[in-house]
Amino acid sequence: MEEANVPFLKWAGGKRWLIRNGAQLAPVRFNTYIEPFLGSGAVFFSLNPSRSILADVNTELVDTYNAIKTNWKEVESQLRRHERNHDDSYYYKLRDSRPRTNVTRAARFIYLNRTCWNGLYRVNLNGKFNVPRGSKNNVVLDTDDFKKTSDLLQNSQVLSQDFEITLSRARKGDFVYVDPPYTVNHNQNGFLKYNNNIFSWEDQIRLKNAIVRAVRRGAMVTVSNADHDSIHNLYRDIGDPARIERSSVIAGQSEYRKQTTEVLMRLGWDI
């Protein structure tokens, strides 16, 4: 594996903190890396696998990855144009726009991610992105290396699909990292507020069953999830959750930004 790359997106529930924590998330050797809830891809970028299947139900997110995979130079050029024009009125004008090409849609997506409030992805009932402008003004970052990202994605399939379809592709020797939306209100970290309309408790049960099937086929799986009794009970027959502390930073008010906990489960492999 090559030197780790830096994710180009900020994402609610992203796992940069977990990588910095030093937790061993993956076995030393595996065949294909599979991630059914892609988001910012922090674990993917930290591992730099030689072959991967990356997926998410967010089609704008997936299209952005694929645009960088196939045409990173044009995406970067569009981002630089956005940086030159960036101000309050430009943000809201671009937020309300509907670009026609994959490249311009990807550049818009990254621009909004970097300049909206807390990097939050949220749409209204009509599917329109509605997050207000935040305090960040940097559109092109020192950490950007879209060529390197594109090179890594050449060996990846990036797909917009349900997690159950993605997990069904896991075979013996593959490694799957699973980080679903957290649908229980654990330690006031706010994820229920952002995710309860798009990932239900029934989905949590369906996810657990899909993970069980993957492990039975010989796949190795790591699961991040909420540190909550309902999650512990759901997985008690197949795993031994390890509690990990982190700081919650997504809350708008500082009194809700506090230490919280999540659980990490390794299934089908040992450290």
Image (cartoon, rainbow, N blue to C red):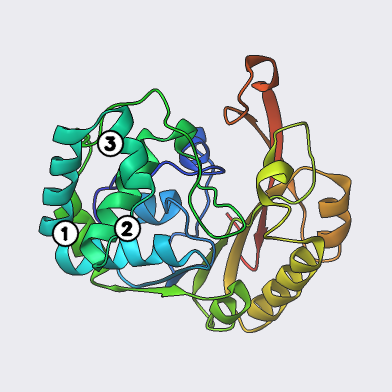
174 vs 125, left or right, is left
x and y percent of residue 201 in the render? 81, 61
Q: Nearer the viewer, residue 77 or 2?
A: 77
- Tell us which disc is closer to us: 2 or 1: 1
**Tag 3, which secondary structure?**
helix
Kindly identify the amino acid type of the residue bearing the numbered disc 3.
Answer: Tyr
**Cα separation between marks 1 and 3:** 23 Å
Categorize mark 2 by other alpha carbons within 10 Å: few (<14), some (14-19), many (20+): some
Q: In terms of image quadrants, where is residue 99?
A: bottom left
Mark sitting earlier along the chain (2/3): 2
- Residue 231 lies, with reference to residue 53, above or below; the image says above
Kindly identify the amino acid type of the residue bearing the numbered disc 2.
Answer: Asn
Q: Which quarter of the rendering shows the N terminus?
A: bottom left
Kindly identify the amino acid type of the residue bearing the numbered disc 1.
Answer: Trp
57 vs 151, left or right, is right
Q: Are marks 2 and 1 in contact (CB under 8 Å)?
A: no
Q: Which quarter of the rendering shows the C terminus?
A: bottom right
- Tell us which disc is closer to us: 2 or 3: 3
Residue located beneath label 2 in the image? 48
- Tell us which disc is closer to us: 1 or 3: 3
Residue at position x 49%, y 60% in the image? 27
Residue located beneath label 1 in the image? 72
**Cα separation between marks 2 and 1:** 18 Å
Q: Nearer the viewer, residue 152 or 119?
A: 119
Residue at position x 68%, y 72% in the image? 211
